[in-house]
Amino acid sequence: MLIEVIFDPGCPWCFIGKRQLERALDLRPALDATVRWWPFLLNPDMPPEGIERGTYLMRKFGSQARISRVFGAIADFADSVGIAFSFDQIQRTPNTLHAHRLVRYAEVHGLAAAAVESLFTSHFVSGRDIGEIEELVRIGSRLGLDAMALRLYLASERDVTDVYAANARAHRLGINGVPTFVFARSYVISGAQEPQVFSRMLDVARERAVAG
């Protein structure tokens, strides 16, 4: 079964949603599933260098009290699925265009899922800036990708248009938030749902495929 995940590596709920989907797939060990990762740009107008984190959050949420409530709730939820967010370590909100390109490059080498996990971990657990080319090269190198080839790729314009096109396509399909999950090209669910919810969706998609 094909599972398409529309995501942004700068979205904490996407990290949680990834973990929830993995838990759901663990509940269905006999299912032959292929996960594909599709770009979504939460901040399409973000400057290439990103924005200082505090400035970005104040613009978005308006007050420190609201920021604390929102990210406190996200951190508590993440703890329940085994993710230790370190929001206080994040210095900049990144432009994620090149992070999406890293995933596309890694996919050619069968490493897309590993690249997504590493991007999330680097940003949300280690507080690294995944908008920086050198950070992306470090991530790719740890995955076993050739650093020089990856740096040349990221310095080029390859796949830039494709990332923007994928983002535009998601909006045309009515997808305005992430994570969004598409099962067997037919069944769509949004948000970091509980594993049981994903499992039911997997069952419905599988049953429909069997029925033809």
Image (cartoon, rainbow, N blue to C red):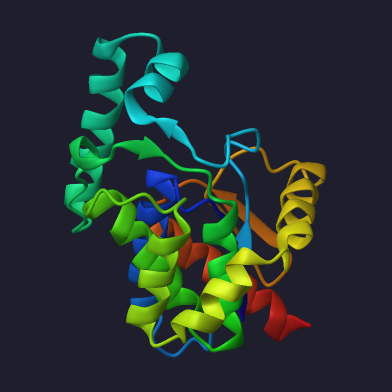
Q: Horizontal and vertical percent for residue 199?
A: 45, 67
Left or right: residue 138 versus residue 40 is: left
Q: Is residue 20 above or below residue 95?
A: below
Q: Residue at x 44, y 56 (%)?
A: 197
Q: Horizontal and vertical percent for residue 204?
A: 60, 68
Is residue 204 among what the camera can see? no
Q: Nearer the viewer, residue 112 or 97?
A: 97
Q: Horizontal and vertical percent for residue 164?
A: 74, 51
Q: Quadrant of the C terminus?
A: bottom right
Left or right: residue 131 versus residue 120 is: right
Q: Residue at x 47, y 50 (%)?
A: 131
Q: Residue at x 50, y 81 (%)?
A: 148
Q: Nearer the viewer, residue 181 or 194?
A: 181
Q: Horizontal and vertical percent for residue 138?
A: 36, 71
Q: Residue at x 17, y 52 (%)?
A: 84
Is residue 43 among what the camera can see? yes
Residue 158 occupies quadrant? bottom right
Q: Is residue 16 above or below residue 23?
A: above
Q: Is residue 73 above or below residue 187?
A: above
Q: How many marks?
A: 0
Left or right: residue 113 versus residue 212 is: left
Q: Quadrant of the N terminus?
A: bottom right
Q: Nearer the viewer, residue 207 or 47?
A: 47
Residue 122 occupies quadrant? bottom left
